[in-house]
Image (cartoon, rainbow, N blue to C red):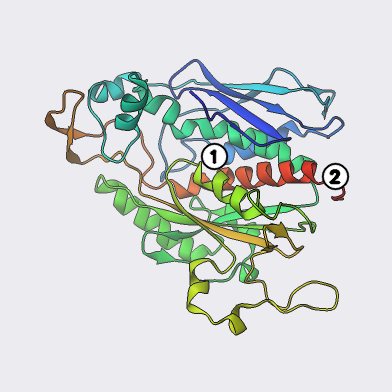
Amino acid sequence: MAGNSIGTLFRLTTFGESHGVAIGGVIDGCPAGVKIDLEKIQQDLDRRRPGQSAIVTQRKEPDTVEFLSGIFEGQSTGTPIGFIIKNANQKSKDYSHIKDTYRPSHADYTYDEKYGVRDYRGGGRSSARETACRVVAGSIAKQLLSSLQFNAYVSTVGHIELNKKYQELDFSEVEKNPVRCPDPAKAKEMETYIKEIRSSGDTVGGIVDCVIRNVPKGLGEPVFDKLHAELGKAMLSINAVKGFEYGSGFAGTTMKGSEHNDQFNQDGSTKTNLSGGIQGGISNGMDIYFRVAFKPVATLMQKQQTINSKGEQVDMQGKGRHDPCVVPRAVPIVEAMAAIVMADYFLQNKSSKI
């Protein structure tokens, strides 16, 4: 299987399956001498872990990371950072009903078609459990980029939208509710809706917004390795993601050029930031902001028609523990992937000072 790594200089390779002994990763390219706060890494993992509230999957995993190499006396050594996260609460029997049956809109069918074999327990390698490894690497990337601020939050759940610009928000509110929406009233509305969806055996999608502040100028390349292209690739590699937009995004198509252009101030900053902090594929020093759209979880607790490995039409119904909405737990994953991309470009741009 190819495609288990991301990054050029700051590079993460992950391994493991949802119901295997452990998941883990190797981070290559982290410079020596970076102070590593293990508690901060665990805090980020705790934000992603299952079982943290009534509106997420109730699989109970401590998600305790164990470092095997690359960190000594509280700092990086410059060698590969190896780590594992042991799986502790697998219930493989919950997936026996899909051993030879394909869940609609899941990776089951395509895995069988591509590889001829699949680990059906919890989705195996296709499970979002793999994203815990990304959170570890992203947390280390954030500590490398200590002057940058990464703030992701839930802006939409189903039809419920926050409808506020990020400049109006208090990011300290994000972790004060299980939805991770920085508006307490909207958060409560979203939480109630997710509970209603769960009780009906259904699922719902949503949108996670992310803002990166204090970004230096000059990160990114002007042709194929555009900064926004790599951010888009990173976000689209997250399970259940269906869309990515940055800056004005699709809304910019309704504007005139005279309305959309970001006019300059004398210091090179811009009066507006519809470019989303990136122009010509290169950061311009303004805030980078983008949105990531997540589909509804494919596994439903409702009966659906599907096919099995023999091509026969059969009925199936989801079992086990699943998220009714992924966006609350996706917030730290979006931050992590953004940090991994930014760390990689920082190392590529030797003249940048952070």
Which residue is pictured at 72% across the width and 41% down the height? 344
Task: Look at label 1 and name its amino acid.
Answer: Arg
Which residue is pictured at 32% across the width and 41% down the height? 298
**Neighbour tally class for label 1: few under 14, some 14-19, many 20 plus, Cα within 10 Å:** many
Q: Earlier in the sequence, mark 1 or mark 2?
A: 1
- Toward which corner of the image does residue 18 lie, by quadrant? top left
Q: Nearer the viewer, residue 206 or 285?
A: 285
Number of the label disc, if any, that sits on residue 35: none
x and y percent of residue 309 in the render? 21, 24
> On the picture, is 245 further left or further right than 115?
right
- Say if residue 320 shows up in the picture: no
The mark lying in front, picked from 1 and 2, is 2
x and y percent of residue 335 in the render? 62, 47
- Toward which corner of the image does residue 70 lie, by quadrant? top right
> On the picture, is 327 further left or further right than 263?
left
Kindly identify which residue carries mark 1: 48
Task: Look at label 2 and name its amino acid.
Answer: Lys
x and y percent of residue 22 in the render? 53, 19
Q: In this figure, what is the number of numbered marks? A: 2
- Say if residue 219 shows up in the picture: yes
**Neighbour tally class for label 2: few under 14, some 14-19, many 20 plus, Cα within 10 Å:** few
Which residue is pictured at 50% across the width and 15% down the height? 21
Number of the label disc, if any, that sits on residue 350: 2
The vertical placement of 29 against 252, above or below, is above
Q: Secondary structure at mark 1?
A: helix
**Residue pushed farthest front?**
223
